[in-house]
Amino acid sequence: MSSTRTGVAGSTRTCPHCRAVILESSSVCPSCRHHLRFDPAGAQGPTRMETALSVEGTIRHPAGAAPWEYAVVVAIRNAKGEEVARQVVGVGALQPSEERTVALTVEVYVPGGSVPPGAVS
């Protein structure tokens, strides 16, 4: 009996640890990083492809200015420019002289662990 889930690409489920919506094919939750099931393919190496997109930036609040509030929003658009998902992933405040670094990473997976040639440039 195989422990690997097979289904339609993009099928989702809920992580039993953190309740984040994740891909059904995930053996490790990308949010809380808990292992979800035994994955013999994972023992040979990660099934994650190279990172398709990585952006990082720092917000620095100037000294002597009034406090700032911020919201980190992630939006996903399809090829037509239509918004298919939008989520606030964090909010907070910056006091004078404080800073926050925000990183966004997009990792592309292939169900079953194989990587198509030329999938990431």
Image (spheres, rainbow, N blue to C red):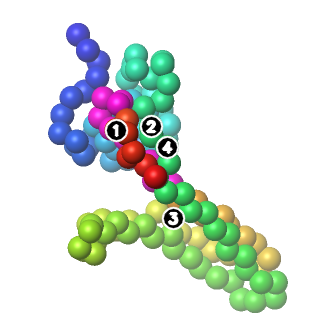
Give the structural element (helix, strand or loop) at label 3.
strand
Lower sequence index among marks 4 and 1? 4
Give, as a single range, the part of the protein colored magenta: 105-114
Lower sequence index among marks 3 and 1? 3
Q: Position of residue 112 (x, y in %)?
A: 30, 29
Quarter-of-image position of residue 93: bottom right
Q: Is 91 situated above or below 95?
A: above
- Does the residue at mark 2 contact the one at mark 4 (Cβ under 8 Å)? no
The residue positioned farthest toward the left in the image shown: 8
Q: Residues within 10 Å of mark 4 (few under 14, many from 20)?
A: some
Q: Gap in Å between the C-alphas at discs 3 and 4?
A: 26 Å
- Tag nearer the camera, 3 or 2: 2
Tell me the number on the disc at residue 50: 4
Tell me the number on the disc at residue 90: 3
- Tag nearer the camera, 3 or 4: 4
Q: Residue at x 67, y 69 (%)?
A: 58
Residue annotated with mark 1: 116
Residue annotated with mark 2: 48
